[in-house]
Image (cartoon, grey):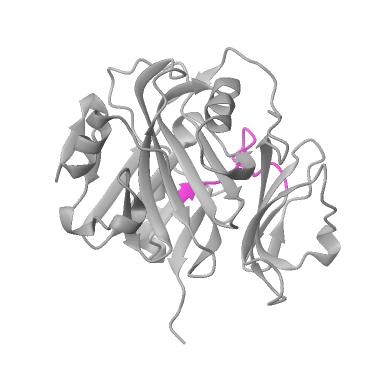
Amino acid sequence: MPVPPARDRLALMAPLRSIAARGLLVLLVLAAWAPSAGAGGVTLLPGLEFSLLSADETVRSGSGRVAVLTVDPARFSFRVLAAPPGAEGFTAGAWREKTGAIAVFNAGQYAADRSYLGLLVTDGQPRGRLAHKLDGLFVAGPKDAGLPRARVIDLRYTAFDPAANPYRQVAQSLMLLDRFGHIRVRRSPRVAHRTAVAQDRSGRILVIITEGRHTLWEFAGFLQKAGLNLLEVMSMDGGSESQLDLKLDGFSYRQYGEPTGSPEILPWPSTPLPVAVGVFKNAKK
Protein backbone atom coordinates (compact mmCIF):
# COMPACT_ATOMS: atom_id res chain seq x y z
CA MET A 1 0.00 0.00 0.00
CA PRO A 2 1.16 3.64 -0.50
CA VAL A 3 3.40 5.02 2.25
CA PRO A 4 1.76 7.91 4.15
CA PRO A 5 3.66 11.14 4.81
CA ALA A 6 6.05 11.17 7.80
CA ARG A 7 3.50 12.83 10.04
CA ASP A 8 1.07 9.98 9.45
CA ARG A 9 3.72 7.33 10.17
CA LEU A 10 4.43 9.10 13.46
CA ALA A 11 0.70 9.18 14.18
CA LEU A 12 0.49 5.42 13.63
CA MET A 13 3.22 4.82 16.24
CA ALA A 14 1.61 6.96 18.93
CA PRO A 15 0.09 4.73 21.65
CA LEU A 16 -2.80 7.12 22.09
CA ARG A 17 -3.87 10.15 20.10
CA SER A 18 -6.88 12.41 20.42
CA ILE A 19 -8.01 14.17 17.26
CA ALA A 20 -9.32 17.69 17.99
CA ALA A 21 -12.78 18.09 19.50
CA ARG A 22 -14.28 15.09 17.73
CA GLY A 23 -12.92 12.71 20.34
CA LEU A 24 -11.51 10.29 17.76
CA LEU A 25 -9.29 7.70 19.47
CA VAL A 26 -6.56 5.79 17.71
CA LEU A 27 -4.82 3.22 19.90
CA LEU A 28 -1.90 1.56 18.15
CA VAL A 29 0.58 -0.74 19.88
CA LEU A 30 4.13 -0.92 18.56
CA ALA A 31 4.19 -4.68 18.96
CA ALA A 32 1.51 -4.94 16.28
CA TRP A 33 3.89 -3.73 13.58
CA ALA A 34 5.00 -6.37 11.09
CA PRO A 35 7.33 -5.95 8.09
CA SER A 36 4.85 -7.73 5.78
CA ALA A 37 2.47 -4.79 6.09
CA GLY A 38 4.98 -2.37 4.62
CA ALA A 39 6.23 0.86 6.14
CA GLY A 40 2.82 2.51 6.09
CA GLY A 41 0.60 -0.19 7.56
CA VAL A 42 -0.05 -2.54 10.41
CA THR A 43 -0.66 -6.28 10.11
CA LEU A 44 -3.24 -7.00 12.79
CA LEU A 45 -3.57 -10.69 11.96
CA PRO A 46 -2.63 -12.69 8.87
CA GLY A 47 -5.04 -11.44 6.21
CA LEU A 48 -6.04 -8.30 8.12
CA GLU A 49 -4.17 -5.02 7.60
CA PHE A 50 -4.76 -1.40 8.56
CA SER A 51 -3.24 1.67 6.89
CA LEU A 52 -3.62 5.44 6.89
CA LEU A 53 -3.34 7.37 3.63
CA SER A 54 -3.15 11.10 3.05
CA ALA A 55 -5.84 12.84 0.96
CA ASP A 56 -4.82 16.41 1.74
CA GLU A 57 -5.37 17.47 -1.88
CA THR A 58 -9.06 16.53 -1.93
CA VAL A 59 -10.28 17.03 1.65
CA ARG A 60 -12.52 20.10 1.95
CA SER A 61 -12.52 20.30 5.76
CA GLY A 62 -11.12 18.36 8.69
CA SER A 63 -8.35 15.79 8.62
CA GLY A 64 -7.01 14.63 5.25
CA ARG A 65 -6.34 11.14 6.56
CA VAL A 66 -8.11 8.16 5.03
CA ALA A 67 -8.21 4.84 6.90
CA VAL A 68 -8.07 1.54 4.97
CA LEU A 69 -8.90 -1.84 6.49
CA THR A 70 -7.85 -4.62 4.10
CA VAL A 71 -9.49 -8.01 4.65
CA ASP A 72 -8.72 -11.40 3.11
CA PRO A 73 -12.13 -13.11 2.72
CA ALA A 74 -10.44 -16.51 2.92
CA ARG A 75 -9.52 -15.77 6.55
CA PHE A 76 -12.38 -13.52 7.70
CA SER A 77 -16.11 -13.42 7.10
CA PHE A 78 -18.63 -10.59 6.65
CA ARG A 79 -22.15 -10.40 8.02
CA VAL A 80 -24.91 -7.87 7.38
CA LEU A 81 -26.25 -6.61 10.71
CA ALA A 82 -29.82 -5.30 10.63
CA ALA A 83 -32.08 -3.96 13.37
CA PRO A 84 -35.76 -4.98 13.30
CA PRO A 85 -37.92 -2.89 10.94
CA GLY A 86 -38.65 0.50 12.49
CA ALA A 87 -35.84 0.25 15.06
CA GLU A 88 -33.10 2.89 14.95
CA GLY A 89 -30.28 0.39 15.39
CA PHE A 90 -26.91 1.02 17.02
CA THR A 91 -23.70 2.90 16.41
CA ALA A 92 -20.87 0.96 14.77
CA GLY A 93 -19.22 0.50 18.16
CA ALA A 94 -22.40 -0.77 19.80
CA TRP A 95 -22.97 -3.17 16.89
CA ARG A 96 -19.40 -4.44 17.31
CA GLU A 97 -19.80 -5.03 21.03
CA LYS A 98 -23.25 -6.60 20.59
CA THR A 99 -22.12 -9.08 17.91
CA GLY A 100 -18.49 -9.76 18.82
CA ALA A 101 -17.24 -8.50 15.46
CA ILE A 102 -13.66 -7.35 14.96
CA ALA A 103 -14.86 -4.34 12.99
CA VAL A 104 -18.17 -2.79 11.96
CA PHE A 105 -18.78 -0.24 9.22
CA ASN A 106 -21.91 1.43 7.89
CA ALA A 107 -23.94 -0.03 5.06
CA GLY A 108 -25.69 1.83 2.20
CA GLN A 109 -28.43 4.41 1.76
CA TYR A 110 -31.57 4.93 3.86
CA ALA A 111 -34.96 6.54 3.38
CA ALA A 112 -36.35 9.18 5.75
CA ASP A 113 -38.02 6.44 7.81
CA ARG A 114 -34.61 4.68 8.14
CA SER A 115 -35.63 1.84 5.84
CA TYR A 116 -32.86 0.55 3.60
CA LEU A 117 -32.82 1.64 -0.03
CA GLY A 118 -32.17 -1.40 -2.16
CA LEU A 119 -31.66 -5.10 -1.65
CA LEU A 120 -30.54 -6.27 1.76
CA VAL A 121 -29.94 -9.89 2.75
CA THR A 122 -28.86 -10.85 6.24
CA ASP A 123 -28.11 -14.48 7.10
CA GLY A 124 -30.02 -15.55 4.00
CA GLN A 125 -33.15 -13.55 4.81
CA PRO A 126 -33.97 -10.88 2.18
CA ARG A 127 -35.26 -7.43 3.11
CA GLY A 128 -36.11 -4.83 0.52
CA ARG A 129 -35.88 -5.11 -3.25
CA LEU A 130 -33.20 -4.64 -5.86
CA ALA A 131 -33.07 -0.92 -6.73
CA HIS A 132 -32.31 -0.33 -10.40
CA LYS A 133 -30.56 3.02 -9.83
CA LEU A 134 -28.06 1.52 -7.40
CA ASP A 135 -25.51 -0.50 -9.38
CA GLY A 136 -23.32 -1.82 -6.56
CA LEU A 137 -23.75 -4.97 -4.50
CA PHE A 138 -21.49 -6.08 -1.68
CA VAL A 139 -22.02 -9.82 -1.27
CA ALA A 140 -20.54 -12.38 1.12
CA GLY A 141 -21.19 -15.82 2.53
CA PRO A 142 -21.67 -17.90 -0.64
CA LYS A 143 -23.89 -20.96 -0.56
CA ASP A 144 -21.62 -22.55 -3.18
CA ALA A 145 -18.04 -23.12 -2.02
CA GLY A 146 -16.80 -22.46 -5.54
CA LEU A 147 -17.84 -18.79 -5.45
CA PRO A 148 -15.75 -15.92 -4.05
CA ARG A 149 -16.29 -15.60 -0.29
CA ALA A 150 -16.92 -11.86 -0.65
CA ARG A 151 -16.91 -9.48 -3.61
CA VAL A 152 -18.27 -6.27 -5.08
CA ILE A 153 -20.68 -6.79 -7.98
CA ASP A 154 -21.25 -4.07 -10.56
CA LEU A 155 -24.76 -4.63 -11.90
CA ARG A 156 -23.93 -2.74 -15.08
CA TYR A 157 -21.57 -5.53 -16.13
CA THR A 158 -22.53 -8.57 -14.03
CA ALA A 159 -25.95 -10.22 -14.09
CA PHE A 160 -27.60 -10.85 -10.73
CA ASP A 161 -30.96 -12.55 -10.12
CA PRO A 162 -32.32 -11.92 -6.60
CA ALA A 163 -34.53 -14.98 -6.93
CA ALA A 164 -31.45 -17.17 -7.44
CA ASN A 165 -29.12 -15.23 -5.14
CA PRO A 166 -26.18 -17.48 -4.15
CA TYR A 167 -25.05 -15.29 -1.20
CA ARG A 168 -26.28 -15.14 2.41
CA GLN A 169 -25.18 -11.52 2.94
CA VAL A 170 -25.99 -8.68 0.52
CA ALA A 171 -25.97 -4.89 0.80
CA GLN A 172 -26.79 -2.68 -2.19
CA SER A 173 -25.51 0.85 -2.78
CA LEU A 174 -23.93 3.19 -5.36
CA MET A 175 -21.03 2.26 -7.60
CA LEU A 176 -18.18 4.73 -7.15
CA LEU A 177 -15.43 3.38 -9.44
CA ASP A 178 -15.78 0.58 -11.96
CA ARG A 179 -13.31 -1.98 -13.33
CA PHE A 180 -12.28 0.45 -16.06
CA GLY A 181 -11.40 3.17 -13.58
CA HIS A 182 -14.43 5.29 -14.52
CA ILE A 183 -16.06 7.44 -11.84
CA ARG A 184 -19.71 6.42 -11.60
CA VAL A 185 -21.16 9.36 -9.68
CA ARG A 186 -22.01 12.87 -10.82
CA ARG A 187 -20.11 15.97 -9.78
CA SER A 188 -21.72 17.64 -6.80
CA PRO A 189 -20.65 20.34 -4.31
CA ARG A 190 -22.02 18.26 -1.41
CA VAL A 191 -19.26 17.71 1.14
CA ALA A 192 -19.43 14.92 3.73
CA HIS A 193 -17.52 12.18 5.49
CA ARG A 194 -17.30 9.15 3.20
CA THR A 195 -17.25 5.35 3.43
CA ALA A 196 -16.37 3.05 0.53
CA VAL A 197 -16.11 -0.71 0.12
CA ALA A 198 -13.83 -2.02 -2.59
CA GLN A 199 -12.50 -5.23 -4.06
CA ASP A 200 -8.90 -5.24 -5.22
CA ARG A 201 -7.47 -7.29 -8.06
CA SER A 202 -6.23 -9.92 -5.59
CA GLY A 203 -9.77 -10.53 -4.34
CA ARG A 204 -9.30 -8.76 -1.01
CA ILE A 205 -11.99 -6.46 0.42
CA LEU A 206 -11.04 -2.93 1.46
CA VAL A 207 -13.11 -0.84 3.86
CA ILE A 208 -12.16 2.81 3.30
CA ILE A 209 -13.27 5.75 5.44
CA THR A 210 -12.36 9.42 5.48
CA GLU A 211 -11.57 11.38 8.64
CA GLY A 212 -12.50 14.63 6.88
CA ARG A 213 -15.15 15.80 4.45
CA HIS A 214 -14.90 15.31 0.69
CA THR A 215 -17.14 15.65 -2.32
CA LEU A 216 -17.97 12.19 -3.62
CA TRP A 217 -16.47 12.94 -7.05
CA GLU A 218 -13.17 14.14 -5.57
CA PHE A 219 -13.03 11.19 -3.19
CA ALA A 220 -13.43 8.87 -6.20
CA GLY A 221 -10.61 10.75 -7.94
CA PHE A 222 -8.39 10.24 -4.91
CA LEU A 223 -9.08 6.49 -4.95
CA GLN A 224 -8.27 6.36 -8.67
CA LYS A 225 -4.73 7.50 -7.90
CA ALA A 226 -4.21 5.89 -4.50
CA GLY A 227 -2.28 2.89 -5.82
CA LEU A 228 -4.50 0.36 -4.07
CA ASN A 229 -4.94 -1.86 -7.15
CA LEU A 230 -8.71 -1.50 -6.91
CA LEU A 231 -11.04 -3.43 -9.20
CA GLU A 232 -14.49 -2.14 -8.22
CA VAL A 233 -15.54 0.33 -5.55
CA MET A 234 -18.92 1.03 -3.92
CA SER A 235 -19.92 4.15 -2.01
CA MET A 236 -21.77 3.41 1.20
CA ASP A 237 -23.69 6.06 3.15
CA GLY A 238 -21.89 9.27 4.15
CA GLY A 239 -22.18 12.09 6.67
CA SER A 240 -22.96 11.06 10.24
CA GLU A 241 -23.71 7.50 9.07
CA SER A 242 -20.09 7.13 7.86
CA GLN A 243 -18.64 4.99 10.65
CA LEU A 244 -15.89 2.44 11.26
CA ASP A 245 -15.23 0.88 14.65
CA LEU A 246 -12.32 -1.57 14.89
CA LYS A 247 -10.94 -3.30 17.95
CA LEU A 248 -8.59 -6.25 18.15
CA ASP A 249 -6.41 -7.03 21.16
CA GLY A 250 -4.29 -3.91 21.75
CA PHE A 251 -5.32 -2.12 18.57
CA SER A 252 -8.36 0.11 18.13
CA TYR A 253 -9.54 2.69 15.64
CA ARG A 254 -12.79 4.65 15.65
CA GLN A 255 -14.04 7.10 13.04
CA TYR A 256 -17.53 8.56 13.27
CA GLY A 257 -18.72 11.11 10.75
CA GLU A 258 -20.61 14.27 11.57
CA PRO A 259 -23.87 15.55 10.06
CA THR A 260 -23.35 17.09 6.63
CA GLY A 261 -23.11 20.87 6.90
CA SER A 262 -22.61 20.85 10.68
CA PRO A 263 -19.93 22.99 12.36
CA GLU A 264 -16.83 20.93 13.15
CA ILE A 265 -16.30 22.61 16.51
CA LEU A 266 -19.29 20.89 18.11
CA PRO A 267 -19.13 17.35 19.61
CA TRP A 268 -22.02 15.75 17.73
CA PRO A 269 -23.63 12.57 19.12
CA SER A 270 -23.01 9.40 17.12
CA THR A 271 -25.83 8.36 14.79
CA PRO A 272 -27.38 4.88 15.23
CA LEU A 273 -27.16 2.67 12.15
CA PRO A 274 -30.21 0.53 11.33
CA VAL A 275 -27.96 -1.59 9.08
CA ALA A 276 -24.22 -2.19 9.23
CA VAL A 277 -21.67 -4.78 8.12
CA GLY A 278 -19.46 -6.71 10.53
CA VAL A 279 -16.09 -8.36 10.00
CA PHE A 280 -15.60 -11.59 11.95
CA LYS A 281 -12.87 -14.14 12.52
CA ASN A 282 -13.64 -17.39 10.77
CA ALA A 283 -14.49 -20.20 13.16
CA LYS A 284 -11.62 -22.63 13.70
CA LYS A 285 -12.19 -26.00 12.08
Residue at the image point whose x is 45% and y is 37% from the top: 209
Horizontal side of residue 183 vs 266, given as left or right? right
Q: Quick one: quadrant of the N terminus?
A: top left
As for residue 82 lying within the magenta part, the answer is no
Horizontal side of residue 101 vs 168, given as left or right? left
Do we see residue 7 in this rendering? yes
User: In this picture, which residue range is highlighted in magenta?
Assistant: 105-118
**Of residues 240 and 89, the one drawn nearer to the viewer in this rendering:** 240
Q: Is residue 77 above or below residue 200?
A: below
Report which quarter residue 224 is drawn in.
Answer: top right
Q: Is residue 137 above or below residue 178?
A: below
As for residue 114 lying within the magenta part, the answer is yes
Horizontal side of residue 133 vs 228, given as left or right? right
Which is the main secondary structure of the residues drawn in magenta? loop
Residue at the image point whose x is 34% and y is 20% from the top: 62
Q: Given the current orientation, which residue lies at the most extreme left position?
A: 15
**Of residues 43 and 216, the one drawn nearer to the viewer in this rendering:** 43
Count of marks, rendered view: 0
